[in-house]
Image (cartoon, helix red, strand yellow):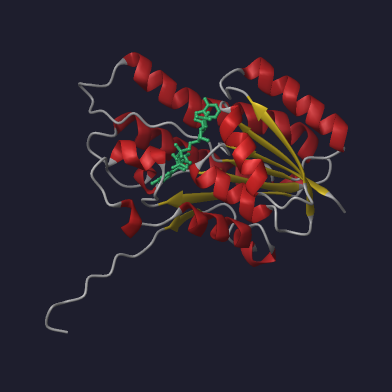
Amino acid sequence: MSKTCIVTGASRGIGRSIAVALSERDDITNFIIISRTEQGLRETAELMNPSKNVVYYAMDLTDYQAVKELIETVGERYGSIDYLLNVAGYAEPKSLLETSVENWETTYKVNVHSIFYITKEVVRFMKKTGGKILNVASTAGSSPRPGWLSYSSSKAALISMSKTLSDELAEYGILVYCISPGRCATELRRKLAPDEDQSTIMQPEHVGEVVDNLLSDNGICLDGQDITVRKQMFKVSSTS
Ligand SMILES: NC(=O)c1ccc[n+]([C@@H]2O[C@H](COP(=O)([O-])OP(=O)(O)OC[C@H]3O[C@@H](n4cnc5c(N)ncnc54)[C@H](OP(=O)(O)O)[C@@H]3O)[C@@H](O)[C@H]2O)c1
């Protein structure tokens, strides 16, 4: 059966890599990729398997009316929505005293509220057939990150949302996954660690591979958990 998959945050970074990796799967025919930047989405579409039907929408996920209209269009056109990958995220790291109300609200609007909203709209369709939802949180959501207050607490909220939804949506045959990447070479990471050598850390393609595996039958019994995806950094001792 031809399945339909929505990937947010697909204009670059981890979202792009996930969309590219999933486009090699046999079971998915239709991809809806979303972010605000059309150019980035177009480039992602060009990297995806050309045999797939890829449609891109440049929109702000915090525009709830636009999200509602899009999901209704997708649900009606394809009949079902089988996969939802909530990858889009925002980070402008600041300490408590430096964080403005605007920064706090934007972080929560993108990292928490918009995921609540798109998930609610998608589940209205997905509950008819069952499906899989995957949220991209962060290791910052489960361990202290001084100076990253709004970002890390928003990711903690997403981890909690994922666990609750996993139980709540089980009755519809919907599996909810949550991954927490460690540091990964993307634009967002560059903001968090401007001086880091990104060639030494996890690459977005590694996360794409993990997600592809999780959403296959290998992912059985891994739903409802906060799964860390991290490249271990080995140090070779000078005496060894
Ligand atoms: N990189 C890391 O080290 C790391 C670690 C842990 C977790 N994560 C998480 O991984 C996810 C992907 O991040 P990334 O590292 O790949 O960062 P990235 O390269 O900066 O990508 C972020 C994506 O989110 C989209 N986006 C942001 N705000 C949006 C909005 N309001 N509406 C629609 N799309 C929006 C961006 O697209 P547009 O700008 O085109 O809208 C872009 O496609 C995020 O949730 C992030 O928190 C990253």
Quadrant where the image shows the N terminus: bottom right
Q: What residue is shown at x 58% (from left), y 39% (from top)?
A: 10
Asked which quadrant contains residue 95, the reply is top left
Total numbered circles: 0
Most distant residue in the left direction = 239
Left or right for 14, reference 47: left
For the point 86% across and 30% down, the residue is 76
Q: Which residue is depicted at the point 61% across and 59% down? A: 214
**Residue 169: x %, y % from top left:** 69, 43
Residue 116 in the image: x percent, y percent? 58, 30
Can residue 177 be seen from the camera position used here? Answer: no
Q: 230 above or below 110?
A: below
What residue sits 65% from the left and 57% below the top?
A: 215
Task: Give the percent coordinates (x, y) of residue 88.
Answer: 52, 35
Nearest the viewer among 100 and 25 is: 25
Which image quarter is the C terminus in?
bottom left
Q: Which residue in the rendered view is the most extreme toward the bottom?
A: 240
Can residue 155 be seen here? The reply is: yes
Relative height, residue 164 to residue 232 (above, below): above
Indicate the quadrant where residue 98 lies: top left
Quadrant of the image occupied by residue 4: top right
User: Does residue 194 appear to the left or right of 210 in the view shown?
Assistant: left
Q: Nearer the viewer, residue 46 or 26?
A: 46
